[in-house]
Image (cartoon, rainbow, N blue to C red):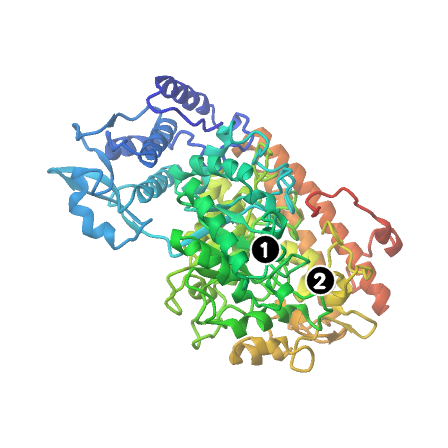
Amino acid sequence: MLPLTPRRGDRAWVLLAGLLALLAWVGDARAEDGYALWLRYVPADPARVEDYRHRLGDVVAPNATPTQRAARDELRRGLTGLLGSAPRLHATLAGGRPLVLGTPDSSPWLAPFRREVEVLGEDGFILREGRIDGRAALVIAARRDIGVLYGTFHLLRLLQTGQPLAGLDIREAPKLRLRVLDHWDNLDRYVERGYAGESIWDWHKLPGWRDPRYTDYARANASIGINGAVLNNVNSNARVLTPMYLEKVEALADVFRPYGIRVYLSARFSAPKEIGGLDTADPLDPRVRAWWKAKADEIYKAIPDFGGFLVKANSEGQPGPQDYGRNHADGANMLAEALAPHGGVVMWRAFVYSHEQPDDRARQAYDEFVPLDGAFRDNVVVQVKNGAIDFQPREPFHPLFGAMPKTPLMMEFQITKEYLGFATHLAYLGPLYEETLRSDTFARGAGASVANVVDGSLEGHALSGMAGVANIGSDRNWSGSHFDQANWYAFGRMAWNPHASSRAIAEDWVRMTFSNDPRFVVPVVDMMMASREAVVDYMTPLGLHHLMGRGHHYGPMPWDAGAPRADWTPVYYHRADKAGIGFDRSSRGSNAVAQYAPPLAKRFDDPAQVPEEFLLWFHHLRWDYPTKSGRPLWDELVHRYDRGVDEVKKMRATWGDLSPYVDAERHAQVAAFLAIQQDEAQWWRDASIAYWQSLNGLPLPVGHSPPAHSLDYYESLEFPYAPGDGK
């Protein structure tokens, strides 16, 4: 069940892999702990095995570089597990029908494919049947070794999901240049908003001990096309830029390099003062600029392929250029200037809000960044959260998308479920990502989707990207729960292609992670696709948002009004009173609607036209406002709360019936977590309804049960050690 990382040429590995494949033949009855993720490589359907063996044949592959060896090792591992026998690996053409992989430069037999792979760019590949030296062959060819590795993982995915190989003709290239995981990991191994144990980076033991888990992390990321990792928290510690820690970062970069993964660091803007001995971090001060240039030179001397810096500045108390009367472009361009000679990039986060009390926090990023459009250097990309508040269960897409045509914008999603039930609630985020990416910005008329903005195609930007706040930790199953692995997987697949289908991705993941049996696949995919909407219903229906507990963000606390600043409290966002509920962002309120393109602004401004899932995001309405169902707003809210709880009950029942198709260990944990989710969904529903009733004094609609406890009971609950809170 553990995908061991072999040493090149280790015969013992082949024997061990064969034994594992034999043991795997026991099938779904064997215990699994989730460590293998979606790279389990269990025996393929016997009806497919003979055809696979015929079409794959001997493997002809170069082994001169670490990435070439990684591709060979992955094929050996995968084919041994899937087909029950180790493939024969050759450096030259052998008899039979070969599987030939490489680049036109590394394999003489692939020279005829040079023009075909050149147009696919640095990371693209072809995977198709063809003829080589007069014989039928299956070809994985790419411009660079990393493309070959991506093609290898793609082939193994086809085998894992039981797809036919006859007539194979695939040309793939990523639509985004930067496909990055952001680890909110502190140097003491605490993970902010992490629900899967400690950080996987054991800084104390690095660089001397390079845990094999780091290689398996790199393999898993390469299998879904992720090509970058920001190793430390955006609330950064300047110490990571000191020589002692850069030596540790260098060790991780060495492990990741064969898998095409560059390391990045979150840079603390005040580092020149904190570790550099300067009395200022003013980005226009020549001493500060010289310090950052020298630091970049130092980093690239140790790590020639270092990716660059991620920066959180002038947000939530973090230092930044505004501390010196400068703007975001001044700060970003200073760092970009230092990185440019080395090919590095600056990912400058747009999650900003000022120390002053805002009229509407949703407006602030737009107000600060749109005037700077076109002011950033070519190697700066502005990283924008999917929504304007903060990774809520549902938000309208951020108005910055489509509003800065002269500046590359990079999507930032959250993979870790800070606001969606932590690790215990099943909430597949593929539909959330897809909903955002397919939203029409109307930046150039209808058809200008958010995906078109972030992939650079709308405005012709060469720099493009997507970042995901990682949900990975030291837990054996990586992400705290088995189904949370699907969110990591979906993020990688959609960073490769932001136009992809979240349902198709979910089906691949289910087949690779659990079973190809349609009696299992169909209900589980259906369950996953409904799960995020269920969470929205029992937590934040009809556009409500930011109703969670303060600090730890665990559980409901819509009554909270006691934070140091108003925009950290739920009451700031729901504005509920006896008359109504919702935040008025219409032209009659904060006018946040005006930050969207005119066709959208007009639609969002009208409660009769706004999509109902955003009704209370944009409008403060009477409790008796008639909704599209014909129910008054209060009745519709209660209906949706109950619908969410009922969906979790259905998910739990569905999973309970599927024990014959999955191993007992994983089935038991998922079942236990679904039971927790049902209890907590009921808690969210009951606590929220009890609070709203305390304001509106309205009875529950007929057929809906009252909360199990009084509002006083829910308000008395405390969770001082809930995981993932910031330090």
Q: Residue 637, how many percent across, how many down?
A: 72, 65
Residue placed at 49% from the left, 27% from the top? 2
Quarter of the image for residue 59 reads: top left
Q: Residue 309, how many percent across, how many down?
A: 50, 52
Crowding near the residue tagged with mark 2, few <14, some 14–19, many ≥20 C-alpha atoms within 10 Å:
some
In the displayed structure image, the side of residue 727 where residue 58 appears, left or right: left
Residue placed at 62% from the left, 79% from the top? 605
Quarter of the image for residue 101 reads: top left
The residue labelled by disc 1 is 269
Quarter of the image for residue 198 reads: top right
Q: Secondary structure at mark 2?
A: helix
Frontmost of labels 1 and 2 is 1
Residue placed at 57% from the left, 78% from the top? 601
Evaluate whether residue 654 shows in this view: yes
Query: 313 above or below 55?
Result: below
139 vs 265, nearest the viewer: 265
The residue labelled by disc 2 is 639
Evaluate whether residue 531 shows in this view: no
Residue type highlighted by circle 2 = His
447 vs 350, nearest the viewer: 350
